[in-house]
Image (tube, helix red, strand yellow):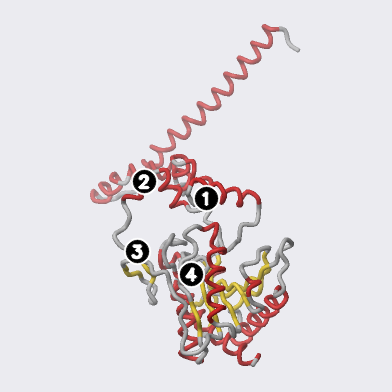
Amino acid sequence: MYPAPAGRFRHTRAGRAYKLIALVIALTGILSVPFLLFIQVMGATTLTELKETAGKIPEGLMAVFYRQEPLRILQSAVPALRWSNPGEDSCPANLSQTLLDSLGAVIRVNLRSPTMVLRSQMPWLVMSAPPGVMAVSRSGGAHPVDTVPAGKASALSGEGLVIIYNTHTGETYSMTDRVERLDGRHGGVVTVAAALQEALEGKYGIKVARSDRIHDTNYGTSYLDSEKTARELLAANPNAKVVFDIHRDAAKSREQSVVKVNGENVAPLLFITGSSTRKLFAGLRQNYSFALRLSAKANEVYPGLSLGVKVKSSHYNQYLHPHAVLVEIGTSNNSVEEAVRSAVLFADVVARVIREEG
C-alpha cells in the first residue's frame, strides 16, 4: 500500500492520462467529420453538383454518427422498446417470455410489439390512426377496407379435406410491403393461404376450409387464439385429412430465400413439427411422419423446393390432429408473388400426397 501522497500522485497521473486519451479520441472523431465532408464537396465538379452536395451536409452529419442505427436511436428515446421482440413462429417457451407476457397483460400493453410499446409511450399515436385498415391483395399490393373482418371458415359444398389458417396473421413479405409484419392486419401469409386454397379447389377439386381470422393482435397469445379457430374448423369438418398453419420464416438472407423452379424464383418451403418435454401429445410421430412425406414429395416433383422438416420445442396446436403441420412458405426476404408461386406448387404436392394415401 502506498503512502497517502504517493497514492494521490499516481491517481492524478492516471486520471490525466485517461482524460488525455479521451480528448484525442474525441478530437479525432470531430475532425474526421469536416474531412469527410471536404472530400465529398471536392468531388463535385459542377456548380449544380456543389449545391446538391452542400444540401446533403446535414444528412451526411447524421449518417456519420447514426449510420445504420435507427433502432438504437429509438431505443435511447423510448427505453421500453428494448423489451419488445417481434418474435417469429414460436410459442412462449421460457420463463422470461412468460413473465414478459404476464406483465403485458397486467399493464394492457403487448410488450413484444414495438408498435404497441411506442403507442404506450406516446399516447398521441393512438389518436393518429390511419383512416382505413389496409389488406394485402392477391396481386401483392394493398387496398383500403373499412374494417378487418373477423373471418369465417368457408368451404365448398360438403366437408373440407384440408384445413388452413394463420396463427401469425400479420406476417408479411418485406420485398412487397417493406415491413416484416402488419400488426393487427392481414399480412402476405393470408394472401398465400388464399392462393393455396384456390389452387387446391380450382386445380385439384380438393375442398378446403380456411379461416382468415386475426390471431396475433396480442402476439404472446397467438397460439391460444388460433387453437380456438382450429377447433372450430375441425368441429365443422371432422373428416379433414390435413391441417396447415401457414407462416413465413425470418432471419434469412435473400440468397437463402429463393429457389429456382421451372426457371422462376419461388419461395422455399420449410415444415415445422412440434415437440415438448412438458406435454407429449399423441399425434407427435404422425405429424412428423406426415411432414417428412410432404417434404420428400415436394423435392421429388420440384427439386429444391423444400428445405426439409425442422422439429422445435413447442406444440403449435398440433395435438389437435395427427396430420397437423406448420408450413413456412418463404421468408421475410421474399415477395408475395414468389410465395404465391410456391403455394401453387405446394398445392400440387398436397394433392399428390392425399391421393396416394387414399
Question: Residue tagged by mark 4?
Answer: 334
Residue type for callout 4: Asn
Q: Which residue occupies the foreground of this view, 337 or 203?
A: 203
Q: Is residue 89 above or below residue 102?
A: below
Q: Is residue 184 above or below residue 322?
A: above
Residue 95 position within the rendered picture, expressed as x and y whole percent measured from the top left: 65, 50
Residue plotted at (33% across, 42% down):
58
User: Which numbered marker is on residue 133?
Assistant: 3
Q: Along the polypeptide, which appears first: circle 2 or circle 4?
A: 2
Question: Seen in the image, is 116 located left or right of residue 146?
Answer: right
Residue plotted at (66% across, 73% down):
309
Q: Is residue 218 above or below residue 297?
A: above
Quarter of the N terminus within the rendering: top right
Tag 4 and tag 1, C-beta contact below 8 Å: no
Residue type for callout 1: Ala
Circle 2 or circle 3, nearest the eye: 3
- Which residue occupies the extreme right position in the image? 1
Question: Residue tagged by mark 1?
Answer: 105
Tag 3 and tag 1, C-beta contact below 8 Å: no
Q: Along the polypeptide, which appears first: circle 3 or circle 1?
A: 1
Q: Is residue 201 above or below residue 181?
A: below
Residue 244 position within the rendered picture, expressed as x and y whole percent measured from the top left: 57, 76
Q: Along the polypeptide, which appears first: circle 1 or circle 2?
A: 2
Residue 119 position within the rendered picture, expressed as x and y whole percent measured from the top left: 40, 48
Question: Residue tagged by mark 2?
Answer: 40
Q: Along the polypeptide, which appears first: circle 4 or circle 1?
A: 1
